[in-house]
Image (cartoon, rainbow, N blue to C red):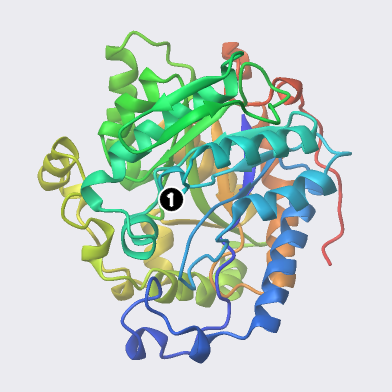
Amino acid sequence: MKISAFHLMPHRELPADFEKRYPSVWVTPPWWELADPVRVGQYYNWTLDELLFAARAGFDGVCTNEHHQNAYGFMPSPNLMGSVLAKATNDLPVAIVQMGATLPTQNPPIRVAEEYAMLDCISGGRLVAGLPLGSPMDVNLCYGITPMEHRERYREAFALTMKAWQAREIFPWNGRYYQLANVNLWPRPIQQPHPPVWVPGSGSISTFDFAVENEVCYCFLSYSGARSAKGMMDGYWDVVTKKGRDANPYRAGFLQLVVVADTDARAEEQYARHVEYFYHKCLHVPAVWFSPPGNQDYRSLQATARNPMRHAVNTKELRYRDFVEKGYVIAGSPATVRQRLEEEVVKGLRVGNLMVLLQIGSMPHELTLQNMDLFAREVLPSLRGFWEDEGWVNHWWPEKLRKRAPEPAVVAAR
């Protein structure tokens, strides 16, 4: 089992009436009314400190991601964050999980191949290369890619990136969206033939086929928890079986929100307002923006219409106890969190690569470190050995880090 610390880097201090005053947290929030660059600099440094704390506390990986024009998670360049983490963790057996640079918005997309190769070199071969399609808000509404072209551009950029990493000769690329006379990548990644590749998804069933056919790890990034993801992940494993692949649990990744405290009651006391802040303000986005016309392919559109579990829920009507009961957030004492993660996520979804979001919404720096520290000491060790007795190899993890199974270091929260 590999367990990574995920981080969105959200705006932690939005106004109490934000969702009533502004139409969206994404695309249109006015910077000059809501943010201050000096304070945002503090957010970036807190985020880096929190991920470095997780690395030193014994997490297997630290995750960055890319979003634009929003207060939900503003790392427009995950590779800038990843380069800091790669250099600062060179003495640690931790993977740099880029979840990652969005391919369709890069022109030419070999920019991603180049920068990921840099990260793999800087980190000494510890990169996990996330190659996301990107959200409609980022790709279509902020960066102007036509929804109908979004997936076609992604697939061409993915193929070009994979070939650029592996080709030993200079080659031309004459695609529909990208034309390059001479592709000759400098530098090349340490990991050969290429770093392990993860493809994030959030509900498009055609991504299942793409992930299996390309032998990459499919990562379901969901804020609705494992219970509502069960049908989707069962569908993914059906595709794995139908295409004749083995049921290696490391083919799958999942993102879960988690808060840990001494007791279940203490968890509610410490974290409730930060969880509600996340679901009420950080996900305050017009529903239609999640799927503009043309963005989803026909199969996925049909699946969305047929499966009631995929229908949107108005999270503004829910409170902390609703989020915990429904599994959106796994919260409570270490014993409660261990049990629910094992049963609902690891066993329930057959997941070998778990990402946990431990800084949630308005959660302050000190409380985030406390949450990470408790998770690393009291939860992570019990999950780490999962799947080992079945003998699976995690082909989607840096080879030099696959064997690692240390006890988490005791790092004082600060």
Query: As drawn, is 331 to the left or to the right of 81?
Result: left
Please determine whether, in this image, residue 396 is positioned above or below residue 284: above
Q: Position of residue 111 (x, y in %)?
A: 57, 41
Label 1 Cα crowd, 10 Å radius (few <14 / some 14-19 / many 20+)? many
* Residue displayed at 39% across by 60% down: 143
Q: From the viewer's perspective, is residue 285 above or below residue 13?
A: above
Vertical relation: 52 (above or below) 383: below
Q: Residue furthest front?
A: 181
Q: Is residue 395 visible?
A: no
Counting labels gives 1
Q: Residue at x 26, y 71 (%)?
A: 286
Q: Amino acid at mark 1?
A: Thr
Give residue 283's quadrant in the image: bottom left
Which quadrant does the C terminus fall into? bottom right
Residue 369 lies, in percent from the top left, at: 74, 63
Residue 90 in picture, x, y percent from top left: 85, 39
Residue 161 versus residue 168: which sits nearer the camera?
168
Q: Is residue 388 visible?
A: yes
Front residue of 18 and 156 = 156
The residue indicated by pointer 1 is 105
Which residue shows up at 52% across the image and 65% down it? 73
Query: Residue at position x 59%, y 65% from top?
Result: 9
User: Residue 171: percent from the left, percent from the top?
Assistant: 51, 19
Which quadrant, please, contains the N terminus? top right
Per the image, label 1 sits on a secondary structure element best described as helix
